[in-house]
């Protein structure tokens, strides 16, 4: 036990989690067991960022009230294209593995219920990077505030709940995470490319903007279907590597996102077109 605690960087006496352990797992040598144990003991560390994030949402707009919007064109361009490249690289690794599972006999069931222990270490590392990236993506909100754009409920609610769910769930290495991670990376590859082009001032056709919102809605539907399927399997006594607690949490999360995204879609596209304000606030995923 002593060796294990040393390996994962678990601290005592209320000390903060050892950041060097995260650095090692991310940039030096990834070990799935070590990553699992680290997140199991330290998933609440995300609260160190969520609390200041909430304060920033509350008081940031007030600070900017009598100030001009910051000119962040090149910073936002670099930010969005960096996240787009990150997502594209992730897709190049996780999608072939996902396709191998889904195209095998009984593929859909295995993609939802088969343990993640059968996944190669490299794909599991991208799951770790995916979890950490939800922390980085809080930066999207910083740009909205500094540009004096309204931070809508969907935006900050989505960022906070995804971060909490991912960090809490990582140590369980849920079988259904295959779907959640692969679909999210795929949509983020398109989404952040879109935002990067807009940051450069490139005109994006309205139909493309609508298509992007539709893909986000489809992601929520996929999440609901996966959770319902996992629940039905467990109800029938079929082995499925997903605890009921996470099925309930996942279903509630995706259901709330679907309602909020559908409301956003209706307001943005069904009532007289897209206003400049609505387009500015599309950073919700």
Image (tube, rainbow, N blue to C red):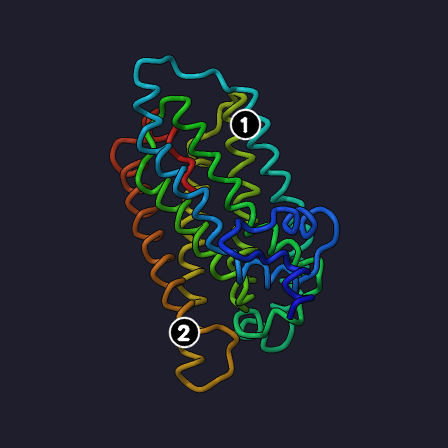
Question: How many neighbours does mark 2 have within 10 angstroms: few (below 14), some (14-19), or many (20 or more)?
Answer: some
Q: Which residue is mark 2?
A: 244
Of mark 1 and mark 2, the one earlier in the sequence is 1
Image point 52% across, 70% down: which residue? 112
Q: Of helix, strand and loop, which one carries label 1?
A: helix
Cα separation, mark 1 vs mark 2, equals 41 Å
Q: Which mark is residue 197?
A: 1
Between 136 and 187, the residue placed more toward the observer is: 136
Position of residue 43 measured from the top left corner of the image (x, y, whole percent): 50, 56
Q: Of helix, strand and loop, which one carries label 2?
A: helix
Image point 49% across, 50% down: which residue? 45
Looking at the image, is 41 positioned above or below residue 234?
above
Position of residue 29 measured from the top left corner of the image (x, y, whole percent): 74, 53
Q: In the rendered image, which quarter is residue 224 located in?
A: bottom left
Mark 1 and mark 2 in contact? Answer it, CB < 8 Å.
Answer: no
Position of residue 94 measured from the top left corner of the image (x, y, whole percent): 65, 56
Question: Left or right of 169: which side holds 96?
Answer: right
Image point 63% across, 56% down: which residue? 9
């Amino acid at each position: 036990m002593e060796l294990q605690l040393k390996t994962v960087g678990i601290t005592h006496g209320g000390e903060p989690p050892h950041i060097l352990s995260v650095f090692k797992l991310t940039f030096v040598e990834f070990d799935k067991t070590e990553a699992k144990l680290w997140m199991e003991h330290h998933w609440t560390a995300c609260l160190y960022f969520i609390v200041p994030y909430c304060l920033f949402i509350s008081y940031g707009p007030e600070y900017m009230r009598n100030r001009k919007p910051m000119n962040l064109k090149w910073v936002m361009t670099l930010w969005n294209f960096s996240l787009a490249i990150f997502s594209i690289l992730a897709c190049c690794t996780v999608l072939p593995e996902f396709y191998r599972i889904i195209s095998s006999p009984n593929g859909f069931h295995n993609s939802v219920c088969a343990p993640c222990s059968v996944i190669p270490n490299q794909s599991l590392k991208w799951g770790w990077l995916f979890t950490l990236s939800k922390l980085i993506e809080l930066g999207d909100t910083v740009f909205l505030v500094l540009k004096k754009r309204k931070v809508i409920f969907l935006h900050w609610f989505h960022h906070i709940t995804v971060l909490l769910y991912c960090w809490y769930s990582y140590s369980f290495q849920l079988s259904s995470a295959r779907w959640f991670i692969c679909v999210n990376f795929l949509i983020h590859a398109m989404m952040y490319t879109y935002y990067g082009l807009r940051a450069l001032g490139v005109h994006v056709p309205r139909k493309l903007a609508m298509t992007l919102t539709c893909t986000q809605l489809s992601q929520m539907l996929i999440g609901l279907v996966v959770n319902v399927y996992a629940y039905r399997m467990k109800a029938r006594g079929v082995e499925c590597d997903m605890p009921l607690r996470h099925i309930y949490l996942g279903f509630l999360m995706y259901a709330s996102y679907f309602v909020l995204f559908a409301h956003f879609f209706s307001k943005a596209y069904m009532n007289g077109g897209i206003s400049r304000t609505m387009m500015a606030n599309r950073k919700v995923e």
